[in-house]
Amino acid sequence: MLHELLLALLGYTGDLIIDEREHQNSPATPLSGDAPISEECSFKLAPDISFIEPSERDLIEKIITLGFYYREIDRFASKSRNLSWIRSANASPLERAAELSKSKTERPSVYRRAIANGIVEILSVYRSAVLLIEQKLLSETMPILATVTQGLNKFFVLFPPLYELVLEIERDDIRGGQLLNLLHKRCHCGMPELQACIQRLLWHGHQVMYNQLASWMVYGILQDQHGEFFIRRQEDRDTEHGSSHSDVSEKLARLSTDYTSDMLPEYIHMRIAESILFAGKAVRVLRNPSSAFRFQDQLITRSSQKIQGFTGRFSIQKEPLLDMKLIGEELLPQSDADKIEAMLQGLKEPSEFHKRSFECAVDSIRAIAASHLWQLVVVRANLNGHLKALKDYFLLEKGDFFQCFLEESRQLMRLPPRQSTAEADLMVPFQLAAIKTISEEDKYFSRVSLRMPSFGITVKSPHVDLLKAKAYADGTSGAALSSGNSDISLDGWDGIALEYSVDWPLQLFFTQEVLSKYCKVFQYLLRLKRTQMELEKSWASVMHQDHTYFAKHRNDRINYSKSQQRRQTCRPMWRVREHMAFLIRNLQFYIQVDVIETQWNILQAHIQESHDFTELVGFHQEYLSALISQSFLDLGSVSRILDGIMKLCIQFCWAIENQESSENTPELEHITEEFNKKSNSLYTILRSTRLAGSQRAPFLRRFLLRLNFNSFFEMTARGVLNVVRQRPAITLRFKAAVCSQLVDLALSHPWWLASAFHWGCTSLFMSNDNTLADYGRRYGS
């Protein structure tokens, strides 16, 4: 009886102690290793046993539950440690197909295997306890059940939670970082024996995580065959497996990795996960330089050797020629790689997970990787030169080049672009401008290319707007015209974009998102410069026509008087053009000087002070965000008004250049009215406390001061608002009532008599109704 009880404690049933799951089948067959874990205890005493007292039966059934727990936990450990999914090359196709079909239902897990190794350690202690009990029972003359319960007392505390743990793992298919998270939560309990047991299992799980971290952060290799690590690989779909070795670094640069929150344990902060992701990416880049970079570095080394050879008499030592395979070791010295590996090895030794030590080690590794990556990107790849090139071409620092380009392409841009040949048409003036203004020493211009993307917006030429304006002058439907003006449809040529060719390893710094922001600012600045040039060219063209006409007819009295009359007629339009040019010039000066130059100086100061790649990336992101926000490109209301103003300026320039008679006068008046409304709306929005009083645009007040130096914009903005927001007319009866109250107030307050009566009467009969209405609301009956 006792021997069968001891066998049941090790999971083997017999005639006295049976397994109800096995007896459900007829005939009774043992459970297979792949059978799921039972959710209820199935070990019972045989019902036909009558010689056992009820108290002893209850005690035996309590004891044999440990055997049930042991068997189920051991079955889980055996399945998790099964390596049959690793087949040799000599396996038959049928065996491979069988294993493949099995692996689809049961996915292997290295984390479960590690936990199973810890479970095996606990079960070995349990088996030793059972063996010790057997020895005690054999040595006693009168063996009793109390010996069994006394020897297995602590396992009544350990096995039920362990059984629930493995049951939850198998039922919910918990794996990877989720398994570590589950074990970390179960560690917080009030039973020291159970806590030590769960911590041991968590230690085994952490060993796998530390091995993956070492592979990722020391060698830049992502070892995660079953998708259990919180760092994931996202390869390009067009990657070809049959490529040459020279393309490996380019593929690694395109290889995208990211961390996933579903496999990230909750006790590891997202900031730490981002640091781990960055460190692995940096190490992978440092260990796998591109072939072009190797060749360039080798040429630099050879040239330096030649120079040293010529200057050998000055006791300068000659450096040996570096092998291409050693460049990766140069970028990440072996001493630093050993230091990183030693840090991770130090984390594996303690029996408990120390969050503080883990975070400090990850931060130190990230600092090492960031420092070497800074050296590669900033020093070797000449980051500052590329930043200067982007400023020259995308931020229009080379104003002479773009001025020449716009002048060469001005006649072309008067016509609507053809989608099929627009880019090729622009290449001619682009190359002419480069020949005239770009020197041969500029090694970055070859990286810049002009692009005319597919027209995603409504493509229109200024001719279309002129036709609309003429229709308005002819008295056609004004509703259609206003609806056309309500939607800002940009000129088709406003889609001109630039592309910049970036080599390894600058893809880490100049990502597609960064280059798209540069392109957005470039398109905005190019429209602004084109508008300024059109206003200047139109003024020069009109003045040339006027001077030619005056010189031709100055001796003819009749035509001379017509010339003078023509000048008087055009003078208001010239004044409007000057207002347009004044606004565009000040806006351009604000963006180029107050925004771009200021932010560029701040960025240069950060580059000089910082030696951390991640800090540089953050400073550059702040630089781009400041350019976009302080140029109002992220404010829809302001950017729409600015686009509308630039569009009206182009229309105006075309209209005054093509003006032959007074037929265009209604059209010009309409453009003038729209421009006044939009410019005053722009001034009103920019001077609001939400913008002018915030840190969003620190130099906005200077721009507003230059615009409104003589209070012109402020007065006209008030006038426009008063016209738009008309108040009801004030009757004479209301004026008389206000006068009577003024008299009463003056009589009751003699000191106020002069000022109040004078101001009130002046407002009543000489000022506009808006001032009177304001007074009426304050003092009316």
Image (cartoon, rainbow, N blue to C red):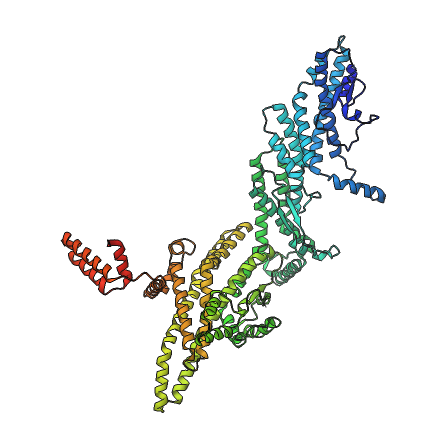
Q: Residue at x 26, y 60 (%)?
A: 772
Looking at the rendering, which quadrant does residue 708 occupy?
bottom left
Residue 75 visible in the displayed image: yes
Between 551 and 472, the one nearer to me in the picture: 472
Between 721 and 111, the one nearer to me in the picture: 721
In the picture, measured across the screen, residue 686 lies left or right of residue 517, that is left
Residue 323 visible in the displayed image: no
| Residue at the extreme front | 733
Between 529 and 549, the one nearer to me in the picture: 549
Q: Residue 347, relative to residue 431: is it above or below?
A: above
In the picture, measured across the screen, residue 552 lies left or right of residue 147, that is left
In the picture, measured across the screen, residue 510 lies left or right of residue 53, that is left
Could you tell me how many numbered marks the image carries?
0
In the picture, measured across the screen, residue 552 lies left or right of residue 356, that is left
Q: Residue at x 69, y 53 (%)?
A: 325
Q: Residue at x 66, y 35 (%)?
A: 205
Counting from the top left corner in percent of width and height, residue 95 is at 83, 41
Counting from the top left corner in percent of width and height, residue 691 is at 40, 55
Counting from the top left corner in percent of width and height, residue 329 is at 65, 50
Counting from the top left corner in percent of width and height, residue 381 is at 59, 58
User: Dividing the image into 4 quarters, which one contains the N terminus?
Assistant: top right
Q: Residue 707, relative to residue 225: is it above or below?
A: below
Q: Residue 582, relative to residue 511: is it above or below?
A: below
Q: Residue 346, relative to residue 563: is it above or below?
A: above
Looking at the rendering, which quadrant does residue 218 occupy?
top right
